[in-house]
Image (cartoon, coloured by chain):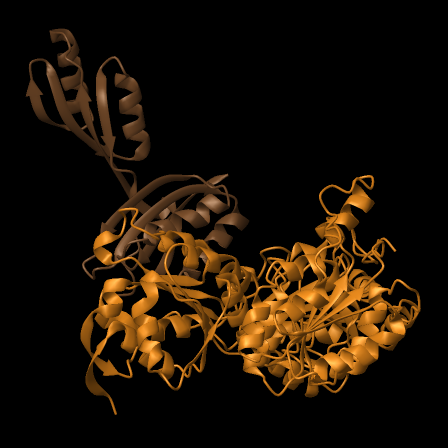
């Protein structure tokens, strides 16, 4: 039943957010946002989590969105509050995450006058969002919110920004709630039957098929269909960074991540396959390396909901535009009906041999601790329901390379943008979204320090996540490139001895400890998980350990440095 | 590289031009001509000319269609379209012989003289881009003081189903 009510723009914003099912907002107030925060003062259904930096708010909303598969909301004031959001918003854009960012803006009459804390956010947010709005009339608030939420989640998800001038927040108008919108841009979900038929034809004839699954499989909830198709074809599966968890990585057909820091078996399989079925992927340069040698023998089928991605990077033999779940289900259905399928047993044997021969080694006992050993202990201590976030750099690639993720939405990392400082605030968003899960941020010391102020947020709001720092006191990935490609000239990568991370954690009222021996890892991780507080475990690792194997930028996938 | 013509139908709201132009800027494509007009429906019709190979043209089409305020992007084939450009020309003050020569030229190409005072004139000429180019080049900077050009507008000859 739609009814007419008179509300301020601020109250209308909250009512509109509640109509979208919003329960949590990550944000920081400020001058141009006080009317909205004043309305929040009386709000009981929406829980606002006060962050300590707006970048953290955007990453938390991003983590929340990825963990739940729905829109995450962050809020900030005008000017510096809004510009501080931008890194997190772009991160969400690059990784197709439905973040809705709402910012205050100076009053309409002052727009364009260089007013205090004015930033032209329509222009700033425009190239880093799926779409963005500035609301000029109070009566447009609910409609804009509804549109923003629809755009953020429809088809290929992405962030949407709403800029709210102060006069729009305080203005009053009559609203008909809930609002109805017309959205003619809705993505086409159903794949073209003829394209699916062609894809099935190629899959049937392939002798060495390989499936490459990405974040699109996770967003479309297509894991069951992916596994069914792989098993039906006996086709091994490789994943992108954002596709980790699309198939359980301990599944006999799962070869793990491919690309620059992928597993050797995955990269060899891509190089040798005669058919590559890419699903919900965008063939990032960190995945393909030198395009001339990427899947050189393969015909390529590319399934994606965003037609812009199809054919953007690699030549595609059969494009299939549509929802991954629907496309994979149609392929499974089509193949089940075919009596004579070729069983690619020789191929599977060869791939399984690669899988065995190049199995990642993790059983190091050395002191200082090897990061591989840390990941091994994490896999032992964390249950299947735990969710991993990562910072960015070596720590991320160690986690991505070694950690076997078993469920979709249980490995959350910054892919396209490679945003240092992502993992910790993202882990807070994840924990708020999924309080029943253990949440652990695999961190590097450099990356963690970029948003470590959110320890205050974690402690004050009792968001009990664990940060496991792979502490090598370097900006490790840059150091690695300098060692490998710049004659070991380590320029501006030494982070020195400070801070003491255990003490830093304690200063915030969190649990903190430091380990230096492999045998201490499992007990200390268990203690951190059960301490009843946010926890920081500082693991002193071998500072000279490289993240290997590795394909140099623009190199060939089958020629990894080891 | 071939010249491409996109006829873009989009919402008539502030910022649309920026949304469109930046996707070209980002791929280092220069827009050779942009014209905007409002359709009877209230939507804006933007006609874009640029040079790109087949693959990039196809890609840019998809990128534009993806933008939320864009309703439709029609790719026009120059051979199947009607094209017009309008130019307004203002001359320097010329001697008698000079102004007579310009008047003759305007008349020859079917232009119209809109102002004529003390041996200087303003005229309008229209036609294809090439014809406008030729005329302007033919008269040259010694004759022409100022030129204002509309950019090229295209419309398909296709009438749709009966």
Residue A156 screen position, x and y as percent: 51, 69
In this structure image, what is the colour of chain B? brown
Residue A510 visible somewhere in the drawing: yes
Compare residues B140 and A366 and report the one nearer the observer.
A366
Residue A327 screen position, x and y as percent: 59, 77
Left or right of A212: which side holds A83?
Answer: left
Compare residues A79 and A29 and report the one nearer the observer.
A29
Outermost residue, bottom side: A1
Left or right of B126: which side holds A44?
Answer: right
In this structure image, what is the colour of chain A? orange
Is A92 placed above or below A331 here?
above
Is A381 placed above or below B157 here?
below
Outermost residue, left side: B117
Residue A163 screen position, x and y as percent: 34, 62
Q: Residue visible at 41% across and 82% down? A: A46
Rendering quarter of residue A236: bottom right
Residue A304 visible somewhere in the drawing: no
């Amino acid at each position: 039943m739609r009814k007419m009510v008179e509300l301020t723009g601020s109250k209308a914003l909250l009512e509109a957010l509640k109509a979208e099912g919003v329960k949590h907002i990550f944000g920081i107030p400020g001058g141009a946002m006080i009317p909205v925060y004043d309305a929040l003062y009386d709000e009981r259904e929406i829980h606002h989590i006060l962050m300590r930096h707006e970048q953290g708010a955007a990453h938390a909303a991003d983590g929340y969105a990825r963990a739940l598969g729905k829109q995450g909301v962050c809020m900030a004031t005008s000017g510096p509050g809004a510009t501080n959001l931008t890194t997190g918003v772009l991160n969400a854009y690059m990784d197709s995450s439905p973040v809705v960012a709402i910012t205050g803006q100076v009053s309409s009459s002052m727009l364009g006058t260089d007013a205090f804390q004015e930033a032209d956010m329509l222009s700033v947010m425009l190239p880093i969002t799926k779409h963005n709005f500035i609301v000029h009339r109070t009566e447009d608030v609910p409609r804009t919110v509804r549109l923003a939420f629809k755009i953020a989640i429809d088809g290929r998800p992405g962030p949407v920004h709403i800029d709210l001038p102060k006069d729009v927040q305080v203005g009053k108008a009559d609203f008909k709630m809930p609002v109805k919108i017309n959205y003619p841009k809705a993505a086409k979900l159903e794949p073209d039957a003829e394209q699916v038929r062609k894809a099935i034809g190629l899959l049937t004839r392939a002798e060495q098929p390989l499936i490459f699954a990405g974040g699109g499989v996770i967003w479309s909830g297509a894991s069951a269909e992916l596994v069914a198709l792989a098993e039906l074809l006996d086709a091994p599966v490789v994943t992108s960074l954002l596709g980790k968890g699309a198939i359980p990585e301990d599944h006999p057909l799962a070869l793990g991540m491919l690309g620059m820091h992928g597993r050797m078996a995955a990269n060899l399989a891509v190089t040798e396959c005669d058919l590559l079925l890419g699903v919900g992927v965008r063939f990032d340069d960190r995945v393909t390396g030198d395009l001339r040698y990427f899947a050189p023998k393969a015909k390529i089928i590319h399934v994606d909901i965003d037609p812009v991605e199809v054919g953007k990077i690699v030549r595609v033999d059969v494009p299939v535009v549509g929802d991954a779940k629907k496309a994979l289900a149609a392929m499974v259905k089509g193949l089940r009906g075919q009596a004579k399928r070729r069983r690619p047993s020789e191929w599977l044997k060869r791939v399984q041999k690669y899988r065995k021969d190049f199995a990642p080694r993790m059983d190091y006992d050395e002191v200082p601790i090897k990061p591989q050993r840390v990941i091994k202990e994490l896999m032992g201590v964390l249950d299947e329901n735990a969710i991993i976030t990562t910072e960015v750099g070596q720590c991320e690639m160690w986690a991505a390379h070694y950690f076997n993720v078993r469920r979709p939405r249980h490995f959350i990392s910054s892919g396209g943008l490679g945003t240092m400082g992502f993992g910790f605030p993202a882990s807070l968003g994840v924990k708020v979204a999924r309080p029943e899960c253990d949440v652990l941020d695999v961190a590097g010391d450099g990356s963690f320090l970029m948003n470590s102020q959110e320890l205050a947020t974690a402690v004050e709001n009792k968001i009990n996540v664990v940060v496991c720092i792979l502490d090598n006191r370097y900006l490790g990935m840059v150091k690695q490139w300098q060692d490998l490609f710049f004659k070991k000239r380590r320029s501006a990568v030494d982070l020195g001895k400070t801070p003491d991370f255990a003490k830093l954690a304690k200063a915030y009222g969190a649990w903190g400890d430091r380990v230096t021996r492999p045998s201490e890892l499992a007990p200390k991780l268990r203690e951190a998980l059960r301490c009843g507080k946010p926890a920081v475990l500082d693991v002193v690792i071998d500072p000279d350990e490289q993240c290997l194997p590795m394909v140099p930028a623009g190199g060939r996938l089958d020629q990894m440095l080891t | 590289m071939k010249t491409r013509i996109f006829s873009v139908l989009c919402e008539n709201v502030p910022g649309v031009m920026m949304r469109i132009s930046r996707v070209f800027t980002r791929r280092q494509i220069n827009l050779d001509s942009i014209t905007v007009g409002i359709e009877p429906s209230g939507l804006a019709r933007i006609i874009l000319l640029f040079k790109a190979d087949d693959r990039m043209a196809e890609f840019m089409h998809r990128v534009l269609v993806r933008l939320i305020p864009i309703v439709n992007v029609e790719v026009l084939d120059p051979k199947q379209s009607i094209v017009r450009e309008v130019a307004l020309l203002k001359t320097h003050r010329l001697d008698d012989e000079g102004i007579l020569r310009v008047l003759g030229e305007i008349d020859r190409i079917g232009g119209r003289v809109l102002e004529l005072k003390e041996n200087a004139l303003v005229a309008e000429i229209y036609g294809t881009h090439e014809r406008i180019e030729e005329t302007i080049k033919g008269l040259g900077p010694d004759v022409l003081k100022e030129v204002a050009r509309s950019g090229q507008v295209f419309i398909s000859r296709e009438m749709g189903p009966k």
